[in-house]
Amino acid sequence: MSGGLLLGGALGVPLAAALGVLLLARYPNRREALTLVAGAVLFGLVLLITSVEAPPTLVLAEPVPGLALTLTVEPLGALFALVASFLWPVTTLYAIGYMRSHGEGHQTRFYCAFALAIAATLGIALAGNLFTLFVFYELLTLSTYPLVTHSGSDEARRAGRLYLGMLMSSSIGLLLLALIWTWHLTGTLTFTKGGIFPPGIGDGVLSLLLLLYVLGTAKAALMPLHRWLPAAMVAPTPVSALLHAVAVVKAGVFTVLKVAVYIFGLERLGGLLAAELLAYLAGFSILAASLVAITCDNLKARLAYSTVSQLGYIVMGAMLGVSAGVAGASLHVAMHAFAKITLFFCAGAVLVATRRRRVSELDGLGRQMPLTMGAFLVGALSIVGLPPFGGTWSKWLLLQGTLDSGLWVLTAVLWVSSLLNIGYLVVIPVRAFFCAPAEPAAVGVREAPGACLLALLLTATVCVLLFFLPGPFYRLSEAIL
């Protein structure tokens, strides 16, 4: 099979799955089986795409002369595509148990929108230029809106308006402006190693462009452009997992990384004042979001602010302008994805089994749900960056990046934030296992349904495997440079 057909299949499989879900609306078992099979096929296609020696290219359309919708594969896109395609069937497996046990309605719409979101995510991962990335970036926002507003409640509709408003206004008002300006200055939007700006363009113009790119990418949830993310936690837990680990926020930080490496280039980026300022802004976001997370009693809200903090790591690594920073940031895309999706899976499992939503209600729960709370501990320790869990390697490289760039304050930020991670994440399973419940334990509480449990144990296992076998992702992060 040619590389072009493989690239077309990477978009075609989830799109076909979305159509199939609609056609099988009256047959839930077949509908969900189709989604699982499509996820497995997509992951296989992505494995084939990333193993092709000569990077394939596929031109989807050319709406403007010289500006085509183009798909291709490079190391950073391959890393993102592998993570997203692997986690789609895993999240679908979890969603089957969650949506049925929790009695969620409109499940056909849910699985259809989920498949469309994965198609948009693969379009972002495999985009050959900024124009293609921008088109799929906007399609991802539109396809995830029905997921955020899934329940149809007033709170969900308010969250949806904030979600759509912040993401669309920032991308159209700032990101699109940066794209047009870049096209005017260079005549190209093609991702190129070393960047595309000629030497004659001054640092002042490049600094302003960098600010437009990073602040226009609100999906990266850098403070103060983060408010849409905690608000979107009103959605079902599988959607939260999609937002935080598989698609939306990862699309944001992926865009920042692509711009840093392939539009500006590390050599030009490292000398820009705006890059240093944005690195410090990311550092502020890391600490501020962690401090807010400590105050959140709602478990999903705490995890949401944890995500805001962790995304700051990736933006900071991209803005350091050194190879270790970019390698650590790209590796953190994968390491954080598996750790955070584990935490959200566990939060949803607790909700399904006990209807508990608050951290203060989880004391002693480890005795009734030991597998769930054990998996939560694994995910939390990976977020902290302790061995033997995958997050160790990305944090190590990020620390090295701050040292290589001479920004010692950001080195301290990483150390302090890891301690704060312990304070708002690790404490949850510790109290679940070792504290007596505040009220008598509910009779009959046990682990969540098998589909939920299998998914969260799988992702927790990957968190451990990524410590001992980081090679595939690490080689991709090195190849970026």
Image (cartoon, grey):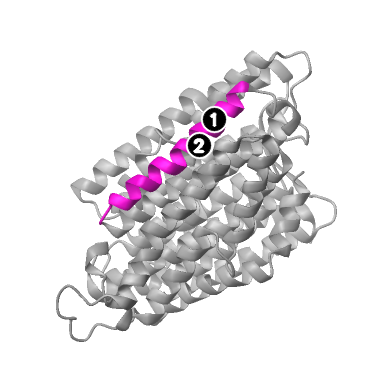
Single out the residue that lies furthest toward the left. Answer: 439
Q: How many marks?
A: 2
Task: Give how far across and how far down residue 367 sits, in percent.
Answer: 31, 83
Q: Amino acid at mark 2?
A: Ala
Q: Which residues are magenta?
A: 273-297
In the rendered image of this protein, does residue 454 appear above or below residue 414?
Answer: below
Residue 193 image-quadrant placement = top right
Cα–Cα span, label 2 and label 1 = 6 Å
Residue beneath the point at 36% across and 71% down: 430
Task: Give how far across and how far down residue 442 sits, in percent.
Answer: 18, 81
Whether 164 is among the magenta residues is no
Q: Which residue is mark 2?
A: 282
365 to the left or right of 471 = left
Tell me the tag on residue 137: none
Q: Residues within 10 Å of mark 1 (few under 14, many from 20)?
A: many
Query: Can residue 388 be seen at all in this image of the molecule?
Result: yes
Circle 2 SS class: helix
Q: Amino acid at mark 1?
A: Leu
Decide whether the magenta segment is chiefly helix, strand or loop: helix
Single out the residue that lies furthest toward the right. Answer: 54
Tell me the tag on residue 278: 1
- CB of mark 2 within 8 Å of CB of mark 1? yes
Give the quadrant of the N terminus. bottom right
426 to the left or right of 159 = right
Residue beneath the point at 23% across and 64% down: 360
Nearer to us in this view, 463 or 271: 271
Circle 1 SS class: helix
